[in-house]
Amino acid sequence: MDSFSFTPVAFVRTPYAATAEVPKGCGAAHVAEGVIEVLSELEPGLADIEGFSHLFVIWVFDRSPGVELYGTAPTDDRPHGVFATRSPKRPNPIGLTVVELLRREGTTLHVRGVDMLDGTPVLDIKPYLTSVDPQKLRRGWLAEAEARRQA
Amino acid sequence: MDSFSFTPVAFVRTPYAATAEVPKGCGAAHVAEGVIEVLSELEPGLADIEGFSHLFVIWVFDRSPGVELYGTAPTDDRPHGVFATRSPKRPNPIGLTVVELLRREGTTLHVRGVDMLDGTPVLDIKPYLTSVDPQKLRRGWLAEAEARRQA
């Protein structure tokens, strides 16, 4: 099967040197500030990005611990399929984080809400355009796990 | 610089054989139904996914027309940086789509909201967990372009 190869467009500086330091689980507040350093030759690609309050960051779990198709997330004591979780142990170790864009200085994006390790390579950055209506959102096992904890 | 190589976990069947058929621009309704066919050996990774109403699909613009760091999107007549748009002409041709999960049959996910070409390779599938509060969302040039059209 064809494979697809990508090189980073940016690297993220975050407060987290080790996985254990990243807040996880129900109600984990992702409010840490970080910095996305975009490669200087890509600066034209950032034009007008400062008009968006939130960005999607697509990144690589470059220190990922392998693949686990069915396992237990920190948010629950029951196992789930990896595609129903944000586990790093994915067939393709790709992460996705929504961050708030605080300000841009050239190729430096100051953001809030990072949950990746310091030095993480970024593959893409996209504007966050629309949200799913909360009334229409179902959150499966995660909502159930939260309800059990609150009970 | 390190590069990262990924092989597809799934392929999407959509109604779109060519880019020109995909609805684009302000107010384009992404309501087309499609099917994500996950590789059979990955079926354990889909456990409990049916509890989520919406999924993130990370995919490859495998018929991408090259890179344009600064160009004009179909939603506006003014150019913008590629990281401020959903243009396929990205340094890494990675797409991100939020789909509604209608039902699952084994490794087949029936979804609504596809905007990729038929046969597009999928790199990852993740649950959509939370939305950004619409009150806090700013949509930069896209909101301005919409306002100009309505004026």
Image (cartoon, coloured by chain):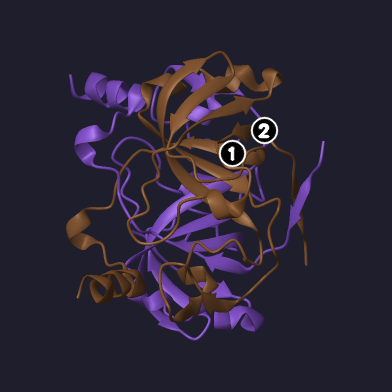
Chain colours: A brown, B purple
Amino acid at dot 2 = Val
Identified at 35% across, 58% down, the residue is B129
Q: Is residue B5 above or below residue A121?
A: below
Residue at label 1?
Answer: A124
- Quarter of the image with the C terminus of chain B is top left
Mark before the other along the chain sequence, 1 or 2: 2
Mark 1 and mark 2 in contact? Answer it, CB < 8 Å: yes
Identified at 32% across, 74% down, the residue is A145
Q: Secondary structure at mark 1?
A: strand
Chain ID at mark 1: A
Quote the CA–CA distance across marks 1 and 2: 7 Å
- Asked whether B32 or A65 is in front, the reply is A65
Whole-percent x and y of residue B54? 35, 63
Image mark for residue B108:
none
Residue at label 2?
Answer: A9
**Residue at the outermost top position:** A106
Whole-percent x and y of residue A76? 41, 73
Identified at 35% across, 29% down, the residue is A53
Chain ID at mark 2: A
Q: Is residue B47 above or below residue A139?
A: below
- On the question of residue B73 being in view, the answer is no
Disc 1 with disc 2 on a shared chain: yes
**Residue at the outermost bottom position:** B106
Q: Is residue A9 left or right of residue A139?
A: right
Q: Secondary structure at mark 2?
A: loop
Amino acid at dot 1 = Asp
**Few, some or many residues within 10 Å of mark 1 (<14, 14–19, 20+):** many
